[in-house]
Amino acid sequence: MSGAFHFRLLTLASFCLLELQAAVVPINSALPNAQPLQDGRIVGGYQVDIEKFPYQVSIRLDSSVLIHICGGSIYAPRIIITAAHCLKGRYASTIRIVAGSSTIANSTEEGVAVQKLIYHSGYVKKTHDNDVGLVILKTALVYSSTIQAIPLAQSSALVGTPAIASGWGKDDENAQQLTNLLQAVELQIVDSEECAVQYAVNNYVITDEMICAAAEEGGKDTCQGDSGGPLVVDGKLLGIVSWGIGCAQHYPGVYVSVPYHVEWIVQQAAQYL
Ligand SMILES: *[C@@H]1O[C@H](CO)[C@@H](O)[C@H](O)[C@H]1NC(C)=O
């Protein structure tokens, strides 16, 4: 089993991964001239249509082709919620958002241009604290059967509550590629204290603004490429895919708590509604 921590994003320069992740998880080969990405999925999930997850978007790096780097959720026509680590160190001009598509393998997709990237001023890469951010679009998304906003969860969920995560991330922490087609996985909210005890062994702190989720039977998780994407309970956005040790190994996945950050999100978003 890997003991390597990783963010659940894909990174061209790999700096995010390498700094904290001495040995294990192979870096995705998503270089600017990479081939279209194929095969792979959220770990232990199943293929779904975007119509069932119309709030899910793909965050792309515009590098002659659009390369999927992270997931995100639609909050308002011009506002996408994602993870801070998907945004830090990047420029708005290099990011595009693709909404309303089940696939990330459409090479003619142009996506929507971005006006501004906002991430929490309390974001700390090393501890993963406050890993929340917003992407502000230049033009408004037009809502349809495949493009819809998701309301924010205002309160936290009890241990054992069913939750669903989605994305185009890897189906195995050692996989080299992403999936083409959107995948979802059914998880449950894990007791934060138990989660904290597990992570404490590796000197990671689970704070009040993090939520842990896993599947009781194991074998299910989010993974690299899913970062920034949604964890949903009762049709509301409860979490943002953030980090973990391995994927679907011994450790629960860790998500940013949306209820904890509701005020920040609402405040930051206000002028772009
Ligand atoms: C690919 O993207 C283009 C531009 O958004 C769209 O018109 C076309 O229908 C898409 N093709 C598929 C197979 O999704």
Image (spheres, rainbow, N blue to C red):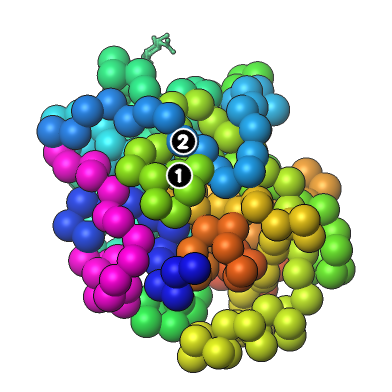
Asked whether the beta carbons under mark 1 and mark 2 sit within 8 Å of each other, the answer is yes
Please check the rendered image and state whether residue 2 is part of the magenta-colored stretch, yes or no: no
- Quickly name the residue at label 2: 40
The image shows residue 35 at horizontal and vertical percentages of 22, 28
Q: Secondary structure at mark 1?
A: loop
- Quickly name the residue at label 1: 170
Decide if residue 117 is on the left or right side of residue 14.
Answer: right
- Look at the picture and state if 229 lies above or below 15: above
Q: Which residue is drawn at the image coordinates 48% and 48% (left, top)?
A: 172
Q: Which residues are magenta?
A: 15-32
Quadrant in which residue 148 is drawn:
top right
Q: Which residue is drawn at the image coordinates 57% and 90% (left, top)?
A: 200
Q: Main secondary structure of the magenta part?
A: loop
- Look at the picture and state if 259 lies above or below 68: below
Q: Is mark 1 within 8 Å of ligand 1?
A: no
First reached walking from the N terminus: tag 1 or tag 2: 2
The image shows residue 32 at horizontal and vertical percentages of 15, 38
Residue type highlighted by circle 1: Lys
